Image: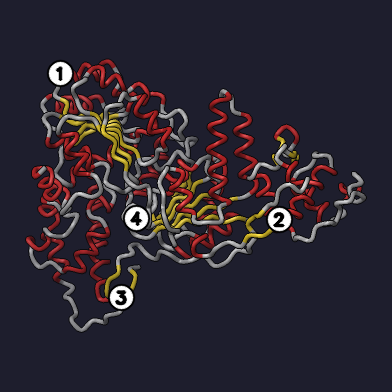
Amino acid sequence: MSQALDILRSRFGYPQFRFQQQQIIETLVAGRDALVLMPTGGGKSLCYQIPAILRDGTGIVISPLIALMQDQVDALAQNGIRAAFLNSTQSFEQQQQVRRQLRNEVIDLLYVAPERALGADFLEMLAACRIALFAIDEAHCVSQWGHDFRPDYQKLTRLHEHFPDVPRIALTATADQRTLREIEQQLMLADAQRFVHSFDRPNIFYRVTQGDNNRQRLWHFIQQNHPDDAGIVYCLSRKKVEETARWLSDRGRIALPYHAGLDKSTRAEHQRIFLQQEGVIVVATIAFGMGIDKPDVRFVAHLNLPKNLESYYQETGRAGRDGDPANAWMAYGMQDVITLRQMMAQSEADEKFKRVLHQKMEAMLGFCEQTGCRRQTLLAYFDEILEQPCGNCDNCVEPPVTWDATEAARMALSCVYRTGQRFGVNYVIDVLMGNARDRIVQNRHDQISTFGIGELDNNEWRSLFRQLIALGYLYADIDNYGALKMTPDCKPLLSGEKQLLLRKFAKPTKVKKVSTGKSATVLGSVDTPLFEALRLHRKQLAQAQGVPPFVILHDKTLAAICEQRPESIEQLASIPGIGERKLELYGADLIRITSQYPRDQSRSETAIDLV
C-alpha cells in the first residue's frame, strides 16, 4: 500500500486516503472482488483508478453515459494518468488508435458503455490484452426496481465468465438492501467484500415546502440563497422543463433545459456549458445528472415529487460534492401525489412490481410529511441509524406545528361522501367553505349538511386534503377527472376509533440562508483579490484546454493557496489537490500570481464568506 499512497500523493495531490479507500484498494490489488457503496463526492473513482495503475494491464471501466467519458478522461490527463474511452462519438480512426493503445498497454484506464463492453468484437479484443480489473460504475443500474435501470447491466456477468481471474469492483452511491442484494446476484458478486460507508451528506440542508405557486417560491429561494451559484432544477415533464428554463432565463439567470426529447448535440452543448461556466442552472428531467462531477453545485431543487427516496437521494447528492454547504429544496403539493399515483395505476408492470413501486412512493410521501428530522428519516430508509436529530434540515431548524385534525378530517371525508365521490379537491373545498358557485347550486350541494361547515381557510383545507391523500385515506380517480374516492382506511377515522395528528399549514417564511458564494471557505477579506485572480487564471486555462475549471483545480485548492501563500514550488506541492503533473503544468504561474498579492500582516481578523 506504500505504492498506492505514493500514487495518491504524487498523481492526485492528496495526503491520505479517506473513508474505506485504502481497504478497497488493497482488496482489488490482491485480486479480489469488491462491492462499494459510498456517497457522492466520497472518492469512489480513486478506488479503481489507483489499482488499475498498480496492477499489470488496463482497467476497464463500465460507465453508463458516453457524454461524460471525455470529461473523466480529461480529468485523469490533468493528473498525468493515461486514460481513453471508446464510444460512438469517435471516428473509425480514433477508435482504431484507442484499440492500438490498449493492445500496446500504453493506457491505464479505458472507459466504455455496457453495450459496447458486451460486444463480441470487444470481448475478443480484451482476450488478446492484459486486463487489470473491471470497474462497474453506477452499479445500481442493474436493479429492475431502481430509478436508472439499464437492462445491459444485468448481462455484465459475461465479463466474469470470459475473464474469471480478473478482479471486479461494483460501485454505487445509491442502494437500499434490496438493491445491494440484486447487484450481488445479477453480477455474481456473492463472494465480493462489501464496503458500505455512511449515506449521510452532512453539508446538505434539506427543505420541503408545501403550497401553491411553486415557481415563484423557487425564485425566492434562489434569489435569497444562490443568486450567482450553479444549480440543478428537476421537473417531472419535458414541457415543465422547457417552461421553467425560459421562466428563469427571463429573470436574468443562465438556465438551460435538458431532457431526452432534445437532440444529442443540444444536450451535449448544454452539459458542456453547465460544466465549464459558472453560475449556470440546468433545468432537467431525471435524464440529467448521473456521473456529473461538478463539485460546486450549490443547490438541487425539485419542482415535482420524486418517485422514490433513492431518486431523491441521488439527485440531491449532486449538490455540494466539494463538502461545502449546499441546499436540497423541494416543492411538494397535492397534484404531485395524484400524478404519481396515476402513473403507477397506468403502468403495465406486473402486480409484484407495482407493489414495490407503491412501497417506495409511500416512503417518499412519508419523508415529505415527516414532522421530525428529515435526515434521520432519509438515513433510516437506507438502514442507517442517526442517533440525534441533525440540526441541518427545515424540521430541525423550524420544528413544524402539529394539530389534532380528527374532526376536520371527518368533515372533509363526510363532504366527499355526501357529494357522491364525484368531484375533485377544489369543488369539495368550495362546499366546505360555503361558496355557492353556480355548479354547486345546480347540484343542490348548497343544501347538504357539510355545506359551509368548515372553519378552515382555503390553504388549510388544501393542506388537509393533501395529507389525507398522502396518508391513503383518499385517492383521485384517474378515470373520473380526478374525483376524490374514499378508501377502507377511512372507516376507523369516521367511526371515532382513530385520531389524526397532522402537520399544521404554515405560511411561507423566510428561508434560512445556509450558503453564500462560490465557496464556503472562510478567508480574511484581503485574500479575496488573490482568490479571484487565481479563479480568473484557472478560467483562462480551462477555456484554452476545453475542460471545466474544476478539472484544472478545485476551489478548495485555490482557497488553500490563499491561506498558505506558498513562495516556492516545494511549498506549493504540499497544497491538497496539486499532484506532480499539475505542479509541472501550473506551478510557476500559481507562484507568480500569488507573489503579486502579498499577505497584509495588519489585515483585519474579521472573516468573510467568499463571493
Label ID, residue 405? 2
Query: Which is more N-terminal, label 1 or label 4?
Result: 1
Query: Which is more N-terminal, label 3 or label 1?
Result: 1
Determine if residue 451 is in view. Answer: yes
Q: Is residue 548 left or right of residue 365?
A: left
Q: How dense is the environment of label 4, judged by Cα within 10 Å: few (below 14), some, or many (20 and up)?
A: many
Query: Which is more N-terminal, label 2 or label 3?
Result: 2
Q: Is residue 419 left or right of residue 501?
A: right
Label 3 sits on residue: 607
How far apart marks 2 and 4 lie (CA) works out to 43 Å
Label 4 sits on residue: 296
Q: Quadrant of residue 469?
A: top right
How far apart marks 2 and 1 lie (CA) works out to 70 Å
Which numbered mark, 2 or 1, is in the foreground of this view? 2
Quadrant of the rendering where the N terminus is positioned: top left
Q: Position of residue 254 (x, y in %)?
A: 44, 55
Q: Quadrant of residue 122?
A: top left
Q: Amino acid at mark 4?
A: Asp
Q: Considering only vertical position in the picture, is 48 above or below 216?
A: above
Q: Position of residue 468 (x, y in %)?
A: 68, 47
Model colouring: secondary structure
Secondary structure of the residue carrying tag 4 is loop
How far apart marks 1 and 3 lie (CA) works out to 59 Å
Query: Which is more N-terminal, label 3 or label 4?
Result: 4
Q: Considering only vertical position in the picture, is 82 above or below 12?
A: above
